[in-house]
Image (cartoon, rainbow, N blue to C red):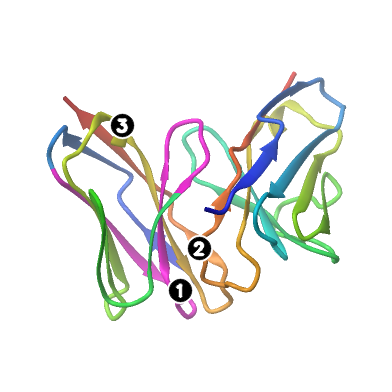
Amino acid sequence: GAVVSQHPSWVICKSGTSVKIECRSLDFQATTMFWYRQFPKQSLMLMATSNEGSKATYEQGVEKDKFLINHASLTLSTLTVTSAHPEDSSFYICSARDLGFDNSPLHFGNGTRLTVT
Amino acid sequence: GQNIDQPTEMTATEGAIVQINCTYQTSGFNGLFWYQQHAGEAPTFLSYNVLDGLEEKGRFSSFLSRSKGYSYLLLKELQMKDSASYLCAALDSNYQLIWGAGTKLIIKP
């Protein structure tokens, strides 16, 4: 089945530093990847839609200058949390859908738990 | 607006059956997904329904009624490992996923 690899699984960083999270589709191509954030005991919140070769589409309230998204190829999208602060500590999850199948299921990476101290 | 409703929490007994309901209102409809999410982990795909009726997959079944905007996930022979959150998500006319808040299922021995 389709596999999405997300790295790192967890990261601890100091306030003010930047953190990059990678999301790769291992056995399929994805024109579009999705970045979610989930706070403890809350539901998934879509942050942005990453589009290969073009700018990401951000959801309302998500700062595009703070959460930089790059989707340079059909198998890789990156999310960079710039100048991280403790309130950015959360579980970040990427997902992707197989190219050409709009109604195929989203396959999720294992998530990245970010702790900002 | 677009909306997904599902119960916040349910409790069931090991070995029993539980049905988790989901109602949706979306701009267009291209199918409904169910995902399972264990605490601290990413969601995993369980089922997809786009036509009316019941889809059975082992101990899990999913039902859809498009006319009623309603779906349910049926879990049989419950096991302790089924304790998780179950997320309902509908695909709208733009093929965007609209997520429910999830139903936390607690299984008791």
> Can residue B30 be found in the magenta stretch?
yes
Tell me the kind of residue under disc 2.
Ile
The residue to which callout 2 is attached is B98
Q: Confirm or deny contact between disc 2 and disc 1 (CB under 8 A).
A: yes
* Crowd rating for badge 2 (residues with CA inside 10 Å; few <14, some 14–19, many 20+): many
Measured as percent of width and height from the top left, residue B71 is found at 29, 65
Q: Answer left or right for A117 relative to A91.
A: right
Q: Residue at x 71, y 45 (%)?
A: A23
Q: Nearer the viewer, residue A87 or A67?
A: A67
Q: CA distance from mark 3 to mark 2?
A: 27 Å
Q: Confirm or deny contact between disc 3 and disc 2 (CB under 8 A).
A: no
Q: What is the magenta range?
A: B17-44
In the rendered structure, find residue B81 and report the number of the disc placed on it.
Answer: 3
Q: Answer left or right for A100 relative to B82.
A: right
Q: Residue at x 53, y 64 (%)?
A: B97
Measured as percent of width and height from the top left, residue A71 is found at 81, 56
* Crowd rating for badge 1 (residues with CA inside 10 Å; few <14, some 14–19, many 20+): some
Disc nearer the start of the sequence (2/1):
1
Q: Residue at x 42, y 61 (%)?
A: B33
The residue to which callout 1 is attached is B26
